[in-house]
Amino acid sequence: MRPRVEVCQYPAYQMWCSCFRSNAICCEIGPIPRLVSVIQFALMTEPRGPGSHSESPPSPTPAGCPAESSAFQQWPSAEQIEPSKPALRLTATGRAVALCEILLCSDFPTQVLLTFVLTEAGLSTVDAGGQLSATYVITLSLLDTAVLVSLILLFLLVHGERPREVFLGLRPARPEAVLGIALIPVALFVSLTLFTVMSRFAPWLHNVPTNPLEALIRTPGLAVLFGVVGIVAGGFREELQRAFILRRFEQHLGGGWTGLAVFSVAFGAGHAIQGWDVAIITGTLGAGWGALYLVRRSIIAPLTSHAGFNLAEIVGHSMT
């Protein structure tokens, strides 16, 4: 008997007999192991369909498997073997529901609600000196992360979608994290290049002399707290949000790349309070992280790159 391996992520295995799945040896990822698993399944079963002969004897059930199991009676479809890319379903109801979910997960409704709640709780948006309150910004960011992530998970589960499959796909986490770390210098280079070009040819885009969020980092303790916010509310929340919205565009609203273009503009505009130059840089970086997700079907690399970029920006500002 083959040793049991708990890390099998192939959706095809999940459709087959529990006996076969529990004794399967799986690899992390790759077309060749998947092909091998399909061939093994083909050799163990006889596909049945509309054109099969009724007099054909039933396929033998492997020893140890329940006789009533129907998992060996049907060849797995392409969607069962590789379901990570959602099918495009352009229906009026689907578009309306997807659009409502995108709007609810756009940060605007949740932050408006939380602003009202925090104000009623007595937490002011400004401190005693009339400046934007660091406590308020940190509290709002972390609470918004909790509410937004809960909404995203709720919508996925209501539609029968698996969050692990949507956000992690079939790729192993460690190589994706290494890729994300390697892309941190690339993100910093893109940011610096865009800022230099805009300062030289479009200085009017620098319409906010002092970034209000960077001005909040006044002590080492605040730098640490904003570092946590940069990882949790920046890297984690925003990449989870981006992946969810791109998936809804893929399913109902014209495709993931269309969604990437639309959401990148909205993502950049959401940072306009820091200046139009920052909005352009942020939108460009967001487009890059979103493209990385669409290509690799995992948020690990964009999340790691995004969080690392935020940390590098905070450390660089606190050292000046």
Image (cartoon, rainbow, N blue to C red):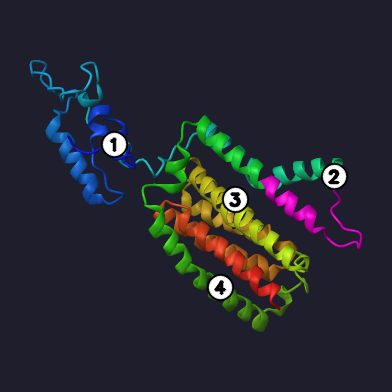
229 vs 278: above or below: above
Per the image, label 2 sits on a secondary structure element best described as helix
Q: CA distance from mark 4 to mark 3?
A: 20 Å
The quadrant in which residue 179 appears is bottom left
Identify which amino acid the numbered label 3 is placed on.
Arg
Identify which amino acid the numbered label 4 is placed on.
Leu
Quadrant containing the N terminus in the rendered view: top left
Residue 194 in magenta stretch:
no
Identify which amino acid the numbered label 1 is placed on.
Ala
Percent from the top left, x then y, of residue 231?
Answer: 60, 57
Which residue is at the front of the view, 58 or 263?
58
Which residue is at the front of the view, 297 or 236?
236
Which residue is at the front of the view, 284 or 161?
161
Percent from the top left, x then y, of residue 269?
Answer: 67, 59
Look at mark 3 in the image and give the residue it sits on: 237
Label annotation for residue 188: 4
Quadrant containing the C terminus in the rendered view: bottom right
Label 1 close to label 3 by CB (< 8 Å): no
> Quick check: 151 left or right of 302?
right
